Amino acid sequence: MVVATTALCLLLVFHGRITHVPLKNKFKHENVRKTHGDTIKALILYHAADYFVYHGSVIGFQYDLLNQMGKDLHRPVVITIEPDPEKTILECFAQNYDIVGIDFNKDLFVPDYIVESEPHSYTYPVLIMRKGMKFDSTAKHIIHASAHYSNQVDLSILEHPELWKLQHDREATAEDLFDMLGDTLIDYAVCNFNVAITMLPFYTNLSLGPTIGKNFPRTWILNKHNRELNDTINQWLRDFKETNKYQNLCLRYLSRHSIIIQNSFGSKKNKISSYDKVLQKACERYNLDWKFMSSIIWQESHFSSDVLGMGGSFGIMQMMPVTCARYGITDTSTVEEQIWAGAKYISFLYKIFDGKVDTAEIYNFVAASYNSGPGHILDAMALCKKYGKDATRWEKVSEYLALKSHKEYYNDPVVKCGYYPGKHTIRYVQEVMNRYKGYVITKQEE
């Protein structure tokens, strides 16, 4: 973050007056989108306070806040998670998203280059240390900050302020600093309160120290081209902050007494489910990512094996009877047998699209097929090709999947499977993929 911020400032200086530097010349985003249609596209910097996995479900303050906004505004919100702070801060200026959620010192930039939302919450810097540490008034003390930490720290608040020095660790995240503290590699660190209360339950030997800075607003960076949408977002924030739902959200995530935080981070070895090991074995056999299959299972059954769904679907995989019969599954099959059969079926779906769609997006097509059956997805791809769109990209194919509920499209000669209400499957894919991305990031942390 420090590197990215410095680079941006220097770039602005060397191009003369800030107000005369076009964004497209700085960042080379030639195709700036002025509107995003009905979907709100959001980017969140990944860290434990705003995005984490709890009993298999992805939750977090900003994650829940964005989804609540989507519900209230009746607009789908597509959330992308970025673990790299420097990439996230660059996206604040690139106008590729409607909302970018990251905490950094926005005072460095004039309003011509960033548009801030109303504050969605407030936080402040706090000192983190090991329990039982005795202050040595004869020695110098270093407070370590993560590379992207840019909020003002007031060392004068501390006892003997002349003995304290703030040092940014260029490669370290807040999570890294907690590890270093726990392993006694450093003695002090600073982070924001909302991050601290989320991380401390991981580390029984660490404690929350004094506040060492002022309360400051946390805001979103909005797309400068979306004036009408920005007004809508800001009005929603003003209204929502007056509700009990908002107060409960703050109590849930921003209070040191949060039950969810205390219960969810007892161990860094946080499993997705009790079936992690069998999923890993089955997916290794069929060359699948077990975290993707875990997300499918959560969506279908929340890892419950006794669920009976519409049309007779049953078990942890919620496969339809005809599919179960094909893979040798009955209502007496064990959960492990169901998982192995599910992996085989997902592998079958994967092979249908392998080589036909963008490799980076293939799981979107697999998830869609798991929900609707592959025929409707192949129909949408055929429509996509017919109308000159890129049938290898889920964003384009999903548009035509939604249109399969219209007579003009489901009666088209290229359509083989007829009518289908595709919006349900589009939401299904969004939820599965958002959760899958969360699983990928959180499991990398271990």
Image: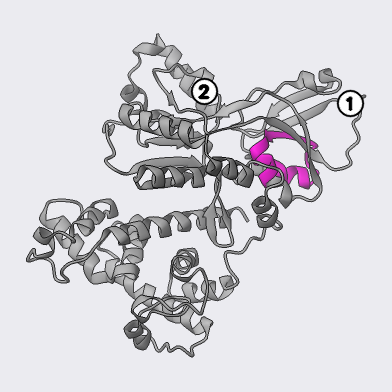
* Residue 18 visible, this orientation: yes
The residue to which callout 1 is attached is 139
Q: For this view, does 205 lie left or right of residue 89?
A: right
Measured from the top left, where is residue 342 in percent x and y?
42, 77
What are the residue bounds of the magenta stretch? 177-198
> Is 309 located above or below residue 393 in the figure?
below
- In this rendering, the answer to whether 313 lies above or below 91 is below
Residue at point 35% right, 26% down? 224
Specify how the rendered protein is coloured.
Answer: one colour
Of helix, strand and loop, which one carries label 2? helix
Which one is nearer the viewer's eye here, 143 or 240?
240
Disc 2 marks a residue whose amino acid type is: Lys
| Residue for point 26% across, 33% down | 31
Q: Which mark is residue 159?
A: none
On the rendered structure, is 359 left or right of 207?
left
* Residue 95 picture location, percent across and down: 35, 31
Element on which disc 1 rests: loop
Quarter of the picture containing the N terminus is top right
Q: CA distance from mark 2 to mark 1?
A: 35 Å
Q: Where on the picture, by quarter, is residue 406?
A: bottom left
> What residue is disc 2 on?
106
**Whether residue 10 is situated above or below residue 348 in the rendered picture:** above
Q: Quadrant of residue 300?
A: bottom left
Classed neighbour count for the residue bearing mark 1: other residues with Cα under 10 Å, few (<14), some (14–19), many (≥20): few
Q: Is residue 182 left or right of residue 286?
A: right
Mark found first going from the N terminus, 2 or 1: 2
